[in-house]
Amino acid sequence: MKKNKSFCAYPYYVWMITFIVIPLLLVLWYALFKSENDSIVFTTEYIKRFFEPIYIQVFLRSIVLAVISTAICLVIGYPLAYILAGKTFKHKNMLMFLVIVPMWMNFLLRTYAWLTILEKNGILNQILRFLNLPTQNILYTNYAVILGMVYNYLPFMVLPLYTVLSKMDINLINAAEDLGANKLTVFKKVVFPLSLPGVVSGITMTFMPAVTTFVISKLLGGGQTTLIGDLIENQFKVANDWNFGSALSLILMVIILLSMRVMTKYEQENEGGGLF
Amino acid sequence: MKNSIIRLENISKTYGDTKVLNELNLSIKKNEFLTLLGPSGCGKTTTLKIIGGFETPDEGNVYFEEQCINTLPPYKRKLNTVFQKYALFPNMNVFENIAFGLRIKKLPSLEIESCVKDVLNMVNLNGFEKRDISSLSGGQQQRVAIARAIVNKPDVLLLDEPLGALDLKLRKDMQIELKNIQKQLGITFIYVTHDQEEALTMSDTIVVMNNGLVQQIGSPVDIYNEPQNAFVADFIGESIIVDGIMHEDFVVEFIGHKFECLDKGFDKMEAVDVVIRPEDVKIVEKDAGKFNVVIDSVTFKGVHYEMVAHTDNVCDTKWLIHSTQKAVEGSTVGINLEPNDIHIMKKLSAEVGDSYEEK
Amino acid sequence: MKKSIYRLYTFLVYFFLYAPIIVLIVYSFNESSSRGKWGGFSLKWYAELFDNPTIMTSLKNTLLIALLSAVIATIIGTLAAIGIHKLKPFTKNFVMDITYLPVLNPDIVTGISLMLLFVFLSIPLGFVSLLLSHITFNIPYVILNVMPKLKQLNPNTYEAALDLGASPIYAYSKVILPEIAPGILTGFLFALTLSIDDFVVSFFTTGPGVSTLSITIYSMTRKGIKPEINALSALMFITVLILLFIVNYRSENSKKENIDEQNI
C-alpha cells in the first residue's frame, strides 16, 4: 500500500532532475570547463578572474549596499512589527496585510515610480523648493539604490518579525513585569532575545535579494552603480562570456547557500519562527 | 477588615459585550490560603489578573494593606504570580529564570546564588541550576515557576491554575507540597482553580464564583456541608437536586412526600431546591423507607457502589446513591433520609440558573 | 502619548510604502504623456490601453503563463508532496534539500541555469521555455505549502477509511484531499502571484517576440514608461486589492465566529 503512494512523486523527480539538478550542473560545467581547439579542458581561469581587483570591488560594493539596506530595514521594520503586534491597533491583521499589499504591484513599476519622485524636477524637489529648502539630487547614486532596496524588501523584514512577536506568549511579558522588570528591561531580557529567530529570517529574506539584484541598481543607480547581479547579467546579455557569467553565478550561489546553512542552523537551535 | 491584606471593592470588568465581573467584593486575610473556584468563564482568572495588575478594573478599587493600588503597574506590586502553563523564559536556564527578579533588584551575585539555591532546595530541585527549560518535565517546570515567584519573598503569591497541566498523580503530590510551602513561608496564597477537589484539599477559604458573581465564601467544610445554593451544591461534590415546597418551618415536601428538615425562615409554600448528597441516601428494605425507588444500574467504584435509581411515582426523579450496600439491578428498594441529610436552598435567580443548566 | 507616537510612526512607514503607488495611480490620470508634468485629469490612457497591442499581448502572455504554470505546478507539486511525505527520513531530507534550491537560490542563478539548459537541449527560447521555467520555480512553493498539512494529518483517519471499506483512491479523495485542500489552495495562489510578479527568471528564459508584462515594462524603462502601463497596473492593483480585502474580511469573520463558539 505504502509503495503505491511513492509513485505519486515520480513525475516530480523527473522534473526535479531535469530542471533543477541538470541546469545547476551546466552552470558548474560552464564555470569550470572551456573548449580549446576542439577539446574540452578543465580550467580555473574564470573562477580566478573573479578575484581580480575590479570584480572584487563590485562584489564588495554589492555586499556593503546590501548590508546597509538590510540594517535600515531592520531599524525601520522592528519597531513597526512591534507596534503592529501590540495593542495600539485593533485591526492588526488588516494592517499587516497592508504591508504586503504593495508587493502585488509590479516591482519594476514601483521602483520606476521612485524616478518620478526623486529626479531633478521630481515631486520631492518640487516640495522642497516649495518649502524653500535645498533640493536633493540623490537619483543615480548609491543612496537611491539603497532607498530602492529598503523600499522593495522592507515587507520581507516586517513579516517574519511580526509573526514571531505576535505569537509571543503574553504571559512571558506579564511574568517579567511581575518579577519587577520595567518595560525596557522586559524588552531587553525577554522580548528581543525571543524574537531573534524572526530577526534572523528577516535579515536572510532581505539581504539575499538585495545582494543579487540587478534591476534596482539599473533603474535607480542609472548604470553608475554596478553590482554583482549587473555583472552576471552583463556576461550573458552583452559580453556573451557565458563561462565567466557561470563562474560568477557559481560563486554567488555557494556564498548564499553557505550563509543560509549557517543561518538556518542558528534558527533551528532557537526553535525558529520563520515564515514556513 | 482589619487584618485583610488585599481588598476588592465593587470590581466590575467587561470584555466586549460580556460582563466578566459584576461588582465583586472580596477581602483576603493575611497568611491565608484562599482559592477562587468556579467553572471556566466565571471570572476567577480575571480577578487574579486584576490583583496582579495585568488588567485594570472598569469600576471599583483594589486595596493592598488598605492603600488603593489601582494604577500601580505590576512591577511595583509586592506580589508575584505563578502563571498558567508556567510562562518560563525559554531563552534562560533554570538559574537565570529564578534569578530574574533578584537581578532586577540588583542584589549582589553571591546573595543571588544562595537565594536561588535555597529556593531550589525548597521545591526539591537541587542541582538543576544549569538545566534548560525545554529539558524539564511538566512537574519540574511547575516547580521552577513556583521557585521563580517565591524567591522574591512576596507578601502574596498568586497562582493561576498552576497544576492544570499535570497528570493526576503528580497533581496530588504537588497539592500537598504547595500547602507545605505556604505554611513554611507564612504568606498569603491566592489560588485559582476549577477543580473542586483541589480547592477542598488545600484551602483555608474557598470563594465559589459563577458568571462574575461570588456564590459563596467559606471554609471547605462549610462549603461542602452547607452549600448556599444549588449551584454551589452541584459544583462542589455530587448531589441530587429536586424541586420542593416548604410547608412550614422544618417541614418540606418533595417527590410527593413530606420530610422533616432542619431549615426554617422560608415563606409558607415557597418553592425551594432540595439538595441531598448521594452518600447520605440510606437504602432499606422495600416499603420500609420513606419511599421506594427502582435501581437502574449499579457500578462498583472501589470504596462504594454507585447506583442510579428512579422513583416509581408520578414525579419521576433520578437518584444517585453512594452506598457500601449493594442492591440488585431492577429491584425495588426503600429510601430513608434523616433530617440533617436534607438541605433546603432558595431557588436560584434566573440568570444563575441558566448557566447552571448549560453546565 | 505613547500611542500617538506609535500611530505617527506607523503612518510614516505606510506612507513610505505607498508613496510610489499613489504617484503611479495619480499619473495614470495624467493628460500629458510625460512623466513629472501634470497636464490635467484624463481617462484617455485607460481607453488607449486596450488598443495597445504590445501591452495587450504581454498581458495575455502573463495571465496565460501564470494560470498554466500554477495549475501544472499544483498538480505535480501536490502529488510530489504526498509521495515525499512517505519517504524515509534520509531520502526525504535529500529530496527536500534539492526542492529548496530554487527557493533559496538567487533568482538570477535560477534564470541563467535554466537558460543554459534550454540552449543545451536546443529548446528555442520563447513561450514554451518560459512556461517550463515558471512551473519549475512554482513547484517548490506548492510542495512547501502542502507538506505541513500532510504532517498535521492524523494517520489514523486514512486507515479508518480503509477499515470502513473504502478503496485507497476513495479514501484519498474523501478523507485526505479535503484535509490538505487549504494547503493546495495557498500553494496555487502563491504560484499564481509569483508567476505574475516574476521578472528575473523570465528575463533570462524568454526569447524574441514573447514578452510578459514585466519584460515589456523593463524594456520600456529605457525609453520611458508609457502611461498606459500605469493605467493597467492601477487597474490590476485595485482588482487584487479588492479581492484580497474580501478574502481577508471573510476569513476574519469566520475566525471571530470560531472564537465565539469556543467561548460558549
Image: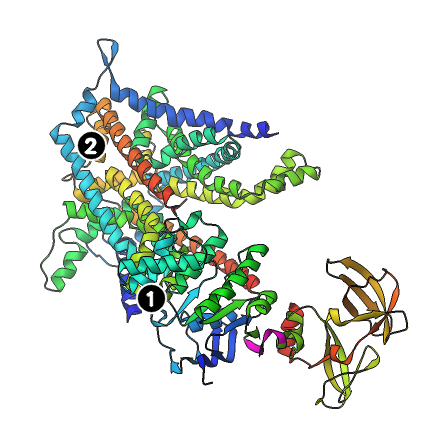
Please name whichever residue, C243 or B71, is drawn nearer the observer in this view of the structure: B71
Stretch in magenta = B213-221
Is residue A77 placed above or below B246 in the rendered structure?
above
What residue sits 74% from the left and 69% below the top?
Answer: B278
Q: Amino acid at mark 2?
A: Leu
- Earlier along the polypeptide chain: callout 2 or callout 1? 1
Vertical arrangement, residue B264 with respect to residue B26, above or below: below
Task: Measuring from the top left, give residue C228's x and y in whole percent.
Answer: 30, 47
Q: Is residue B221 above or below residue A23?
A: below
Image quadrant occupied by the N terminus of chain A: top right
Image height check: is A2 above or below B330?
Answer: above
Determine the secondary structure under disc 2.
helix
Mark drawn on residue A180: 1
Checking the image for residue C75, the label placed there is none
- The extreme right residue here reads B287
- Identify residue for label 2: A231
Residue at image x 32%, y 48%?
A: A156
- With B58 as the anchor, is B248 left or right in this view? right
Chain containing mark 2: A
What's the chain of the residue with tag 1? A
* Mark 2 vs mark 1, CA separation in Å: 56 Å
- Per the image, label 1 sits on a secondary structure element best described as loop
On the image, the x and y values in percent for residue B11 come to: 47, 79
* Camera-nearest residue between C29 and B190: B190
